[in-house]
Amino acid sequence: MWEWETKRYATPSSRANPDPILLRDIYHAFVEDRMVTPLRHDWDNLSDDRVYYAEPGEGKSLDDWSEEEKNAHKSAEDCRKACEANKDCYQWNWGGAQCAISWTFRVGNPMGRDSKGRERKTSGWMLERIQSFIKTQDCGKKVDWKMEAGLP
């Protein structure tokens, strides 16, 4: 981050009147290039908003689940389908008969194989949804900071 910020302020015009750093800038600098593939093996993208097991959690019934949700724990492909069926899902991961999906997107980190050399997690992203979200968040270059009454 320090290196990126140093480069950002390297031009004379940036030093005099720097633009504020926006989440959009951080996404394009650090995340976008790492989300170019819809699937990564031996990877944990930290999905955790909804988790599917073979049996629903306490107080839940399989009757409450869609077909995609009922099968989500069975394979990486079934987990991907459960995410795809949920319009708010941006990413998923599957491993050990457990599927997790998320309403946010994160790159995550590599995850080594288990002691027997088996893959522990497979992660995936809904890249078109992510790109669509990013496009709708663009506020242009000008930032209009609104000050609330009573604040300095």
Image (tube, grey):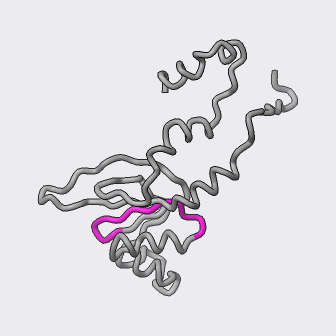
Which one is nearer the viewer's eye here, 48 or 57?
48
Classify 8 as above or below 81. above
Give the percent coordinates (x, y) of residue 128.
56, 60
Q: Residue at x 56, y 36 (%)?
A: 26
Q: Quick check: 16 left or right of 97?
A: right
Q: Is residue 91 part of the magenta span, yes or no?
A: yes
Q: Quick check: 109 left or right of 35?
A: left
Tell which residue pokes out farthest to the bottom in this image.
63
Q: Quick check: 73 left or right of 28?
A: left
Which one is nearer the viewer's eye here, 152 or 85?
85
Q: Is residue 106 part of the magenta span, yes or no?
A: no
Q: Which quadrant of the structure image shows residue 140?
A: top right
Classify 136 as above or below 28. below
Q: Which residues are magenta?
A: 87-98
Tell which residue pokes out farthest to the right in this image.
149
Give the percent coordinates (x, y) of residue 21.
64, 30
